[in-house]
Image: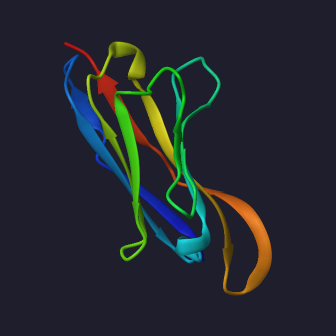
Amino acid sequence: QVQLVESGGGLVQPGGSLRLSCAASGIIFSSSAMGWYRQAPGKQREWVAGISSGGFANYADSVRGRFTISRDNARNTVSLQMNSLKPEDSAVYYCKSYARTRYDPGWYDYWGQGTQVTVSS
């Protein structure tokens, strides 16, 4: 069974920082591409950042220079360090993997349940 479990969300003041983590199980993590998405109320889900199996990272223009994505293949986790947070960063943040499992050769998208980030004074 594939599980992606996010943690680390919460309430933070503008200019503050948060670190989100996503713990993955049931997938072959080391070969998986991982990413973070977010969805604000009334808006479509949008891509925030991604990291390849080889560690190459990429970012949406809106967060580049403020957010950093990283992965730890030994712990099957991907993290998102968010600095200089703005009210417009408020959203539910979702972890996503493009991965395969040991029991199926196919590649699929898997999603976590999301964690709320609220940036407000």
Q: Position of residue 66 (x, y in %)?
A: 34, 28
Judging depth in this view, the residue of 80 and 24 nearest the camera is 80
Q: Quadrant of the N terminus?
A: bottom right
Q: Quadrant of the C terminus?
A: top left
Q: Residue, x 59% and y 77% (percent of image)?
A: 28
Apparent side of residue 106 relative to residue 58 in the rendered image (left or right) = right
Q: Position of residue 105 (x, y in %)?
A: 79, 80
Q: Residue, x 50% and y 62% (percent of image)?
A: 4
**Residue 82 picture quarter:** top left
Apparent side of residue 22 relative to residue 47 in the rendered image (left or right) = left
Q: Residue furthest bottom?
A: 103
Q: How is the image coloured?
A: rainbow
Can residue 20 be spotted in the picture? yes
Q: Is residue 93 above or below residue 102?
A: above
Q: Is residue 48 above or below residue 52?
A: above
Apparent side of residue 75 relative to residue 84 in the rendered image (left or right) = right
Q: Residue, x 23% and y 16% (percent of image)?
A: 14
**Residue 60 picture quarter:** top right
Q: Position of residue 38 (x, y in %)?
A: 52, 33
Can residue 36 be spotted in the picture? no
Q: Is residue 88 above or below residue 24?
A: above
